[in-house]
Image: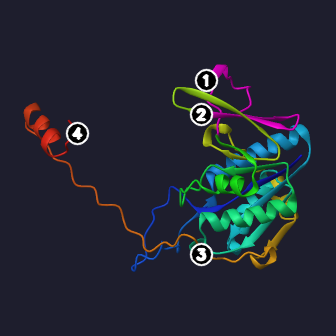
Amino acid sequence: MKILVSAKRVTDPDARIRLRSDLSGIQSEGLEFKLNPFCENAVEEAIRLRDSQGGEIVAVSIGSEDAGTELRRALAMGADRAIRVAGKDDELDSDLVARVFVKIIEAEKPDLVIFGKQAVDGDSNQVAQLVAEYLGWGQACFVSHPEGSAGMTSQTPGLKVANGKALAVREVDGGAEIVEVDLPAVVSADLRLNEPRLPTLPNIMKAKRKPLDERTFADYGISPTLKVKTVRYSNPPERKAGIKVADVDQLLDKLTNEAKVL
């Protein structure tokens, strides 16, 4: 089975983000970057499927040359080879990313495509659904492993592939939903799907020798025209300092008339 998986480079979600003075974007100087946490779950699930059924895993990222670091991490986790399509984060939108993935999928012809549910930088949660729509494939998004729901245990797979079908479990309010789709299909991984492995030192060294192809939009005949343009960014409002109240009556008054939560 051939699996294509996303491996996006994102800013560390624990880092303090600062905006440029003109509010045109974030200051990247001094920021730490990492493999998108949702993509880590996607890579881990791809490895588990490959190890149990055989096949090949192709990790894909669209970004600058630095994105090769995150692709090498995916390779160190267990992916077999990688593809990086050159691009800049501030010159991408979900539709352009989806169109690039469609071209790669048409060229690679995988049996299954696994995306991270969303990227922690933009949080758009659109690419997997767009790719499925453009390809006309079935999709099972937000695949999770809600242990205890629908009789699931730690040994129950959140994603099972057999007999040309993918059986996926999605966490919903109050329980779990089971979705079955025909292969080839698009799946997106949620954080509770699995526990991503840490690359071992030997595998990190092996990853340096695994193939990493460099491509461009032109290689796939894609115009980098954006449908969505980010006009500017803004900082969240600063949190006001708390106050002390004299008694319960004053607290109730402020909650009712100022905070308006009662």
Instruction: Report crowding for label 4: few under 14, some 14 to 19, many 20 or more residues within 10 A (C-alpha).
Output: few
Q: Which of marks 4 and 3 is nearer the N terminus?
A: 3
Tell me residue 186's x, y (percent). 74, 48
Q: Which amino acid does label 4 sit on?
A: Val
Instruction: Report crowding for label 2: few under 14, some 14 to 19, many 20 or more residues within 10 A (C-alpha).
Output: many
As helix, strand or loop, the secondary structure at mark 3 comes to: helix
- With respect to residue 166, does 12 lie above or below? below
Q: Earlier in the sequence, mark 1 or mark 3?
A: 3
- Residue that label 4 marks: 261
Q: Which of marks 4 and 2 is nearer the N terminus?
A: 2
CA–CA distance in space, label 4 to label 2: 30 Å
Q: What residue type is labelled 1?
A: Ser
Q: Residue at x 92, y 43 (%)?
A: 54
Q: Give the range drawn in magenta.
A: 143-171
Cβ atoms under marks 1 and 4 closer than 8 Å:
no
Q: Nearer the viewer, residue 52 or 28?
A: 52
Cβ atoms under marks 2 and 3 closer than 8 Å:
no
